[in-house]
Amino acid sequence: MYESLLSLPYFQGMDKDDITRILDNVAFEFIKYNDGEAICRHGENCDKFKILTQGVLQAVAEAPDMSYRLTEEIAAPYAIEPYSMFGHSTKHSRKYIAKGACTILAIDKKFLFSELSAHKIFTINFLNLISSKEQKLESTIWNNTPSSIAGRIAKFISLRCEQQHGRKILSIKMERLAEILCETRLNISKALNSMQDAGLLELHRKEIIIPSLKKLNDTIKE
């Protein structure tokens, strides 16, 4: 248990005495999921602080009009939408599915206020991680819009991702992607095929697989 908690960024900097006090006062729940089981669903209340401690999950986000879907593969350790516990909406914005066997550490939201917030290190770590996510998003939004179609495709995908690395799957019709980017289907097709030839993605029927988003973004600068 000690090692599991200390390996998570939210508890880094704490010693075993800190962890012991937390374990004595906080109700932790370890939940195991099998391959394909839903961990959280879109629209469900986010009333628990959930951390993937072992395994890999799929985070699935769908466009409001249901015209496309983005799937990410995320490995442990990973906190599931801690920002969704607060603010205007306290519901999950994505669906999370176990990819293989997974273990989730769940802590009731009330303990964040009654116990964990009493630990200064945890509070600082928690605020830093949420703030970093917002700052990265703000920076990405204000970057210049890429001039190339390939660059605009890469940015379209990046803006919708939880993590800027790892494997991504964009399920979308080419016509819909062309509409969103205000381009012709032919130009989108040419750009995607060129990116595939460069080894940056794989094209399938109504599906674009990006093996490494970091490699895609590092290669396509404009």
Image (spheres, rainbow, N blue to C red):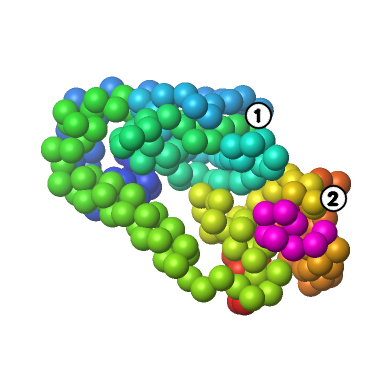
Q: Is residue 169 left or right of residue 85?
A: right
Amino acid at pointer 2 = His
Q: Position of residue 134 (x, y in %)?
A: 37, 55
Q: Report the magenta residues as a range.
A: 177-185
Q: Label 1 vs label 2: CA separation?
A: 24 Å
Residue in the foreground of this view, choosing between 115 and 46: 46
Closest to the observer, 35 or 112: 112
Q: Residues within 10 Å of mark 1 (few under 14, many from 20)?
A: few
Q: Is residue 110 above or below residue 192?
A: above
Closer to the camera in the image, 42 or 142: 142
Task: Specify the quadrant that holds the N terminus.
Answer: top left
For the point 69% across and 42% down, which residue is it?
Answer: 68
Q: Position of residue 168 (x, y in %)?
A: 66, 51
Q: Which residue is mark 2?
A: 204
Q: Secondary structure at mark 1?
A: loop
Q: Which numbered disc, 1 or 2, marks the residue that appears first in the sequence? A: 1
Kindly identify which numbered label has been placed on residue 195. none
